[in-house]
Amino acid sequence: MFTSPAPELNYTDQYDDIFDYFNESCEILPANYTTRKPTFSTIVYLMYSTIFFIALLGNVFVCYIVLHSPRMRTVTNYFIMNLAVGDILITLLCVPFTSVPLMLQYWPFGSIMCPLVNYVSTLSVFVSAYTLVAISIDKWMLIMYPLKPRISKRFATYIIAAVWIFAGITVLPTGVFSTVQQPEGPDGGLSVYQKCNKYICREDYSSIGEVYETTFTIVLMILQYIIPLIVLLFTYTSIAAVIWCHRIPGEAENTRDKRMARSKKKMIKMMITVVLVFTMCWLPYNLFMLFQIHIPVQFYPYVYFPVHGLAMSHACYNPIIYCYMNTRFRDGLFLILRTLPCFKRCYVRKSHGSMSYGFQHHAGIEGTDSTTLQRNNTFTTYITLNRKNRLSTYQNTTRSSSFNRSLHNGNGNNRNRKSLNKAVADEPI
């Protein structure tokens, strides 16, 4: 579905000049065909190369950050890493194994790779979509039921395994019915594929009926796009309504409460971004898969490459959405970049100006060292070795105690509101 090449050339009278060319050469396409034009091919290869490198580097960074730091091994980050693994497979399989056959108009990778690539690439697309659903449901449970214990890491791994198993079963026909073929020429004659021993890789449902192919395509679109989109809209709309309407007593009256309000707005922006990006990237491709038989063959490359490239670019955006908006991931990225020579020199210069990046330890002012102890479910408490800053620690503690007393003296919903804001604070955004 996601790596099948464009349909073989439509063998009609309007392509008689092409077949005259075939008789003199073993090139599948004439030099004046769309995908053979230098400008068109350069744009296509540049587009897919950009998607490949950005998506691969971004998602590899995500996996490395989660695996490298025990502090990053949280339930949410497990889901994000699984999303990155699915996007890496999309990058490695969908991008190159789609663009090359489409440009050449034949399958150059052998008969074994045809069903394998089609199956694994489609599997990775479904894993990515289902993981987005798992992340949204996890956030929904956390916000809607803040007093209930969150799922454990072990249970999160079970969910991830279930995602892979269900996706693998769903797309199984893609691998079973994928095969290499040599299309026949006009009127059953010898085609250039047969003459030059070239093959195409496609899903062939002729043994069970062509109606099954259309049905399977619609089912895949529903499972890969429609249902995930509905779940994303429902969960994130519910979350946005809850965290936007529930206000804690005296919110936005002090620095910490303003920070909490900013966290709420950032979470809402992130959720809106997730839904919009998923919709815009995959809607054109799914519509194309439904109506591709109505597209004239001469316009096929101009339609397919933009919509397919847009769908594949979704693998580039996930690391940005889930990691750039996550301060912990940004810190982890800075730690990785610090190992690079060019960034290391910049980091050393910034460190002398009291600017540094790290998880726990950082340079203090006036040559002193300070250690930051952070608890996401309460106020951030600063413990410093500098005697001059003891007063600020006392003031923060006093303000925290006063705020907690106001919550205790409130109405019966304050406990739930406190848990809700704890959940918002705990979410890495």
Image (tube, rainbow, N blue to C red):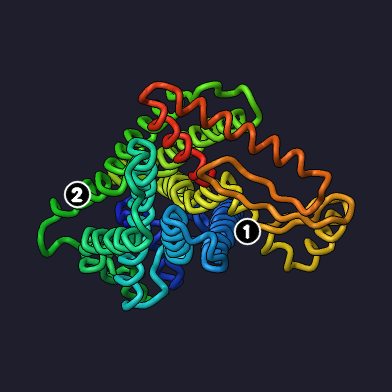
Q: Amino acid at mark 1?
A: Gly
Task: Please tell me which residue is depicted at 37% across the width and 42% down the height of the picture.
Answer: 142
From the viewer's side, name the closer residue of 132 and 413.
413
Task: Please tell me which residue is depicted at 59% across the width and 23% down the height of the picture.
Answer: 252
From the viewer's side, name the closer residue of 317 and 293.
317
Task: Provide the residue designation for mark 1.
Answer: 332
Which numbered dot is residue 42? none
The quadrant in which the N terminus is found is: bottom left
Q: Earlier in the sequence, mark 1 or mark 2?
A: 2
Q: CA distance from mark 1 to mark 2?
A: 46 Å
Counting from the top left corner in percent of width and height, residue 39 is at 61, 52
Task: Provide the residue designation for mark 2.
Answer: 214
Counting from the top left corner in percent of width and height, residue 229 is at 33, 39
Q: Provide the secondary structure element on which disc 1 rests.
A: helix
| Foreground: disc 1 or disc 2 | 1
Q: Amino acid at mark 2?
A: Thr
Task: Please tell me which residue is depicted at 34% across the width and 50% down the height of the picture.
Answer: 134
Vertical placement of 215 versus 92: above or below?
above
Q: Residues within 10 Å of mark 1 (few under 14, many from 20)?
A: many
From the viewer's side, name the closer residue of 278 and 232.
232
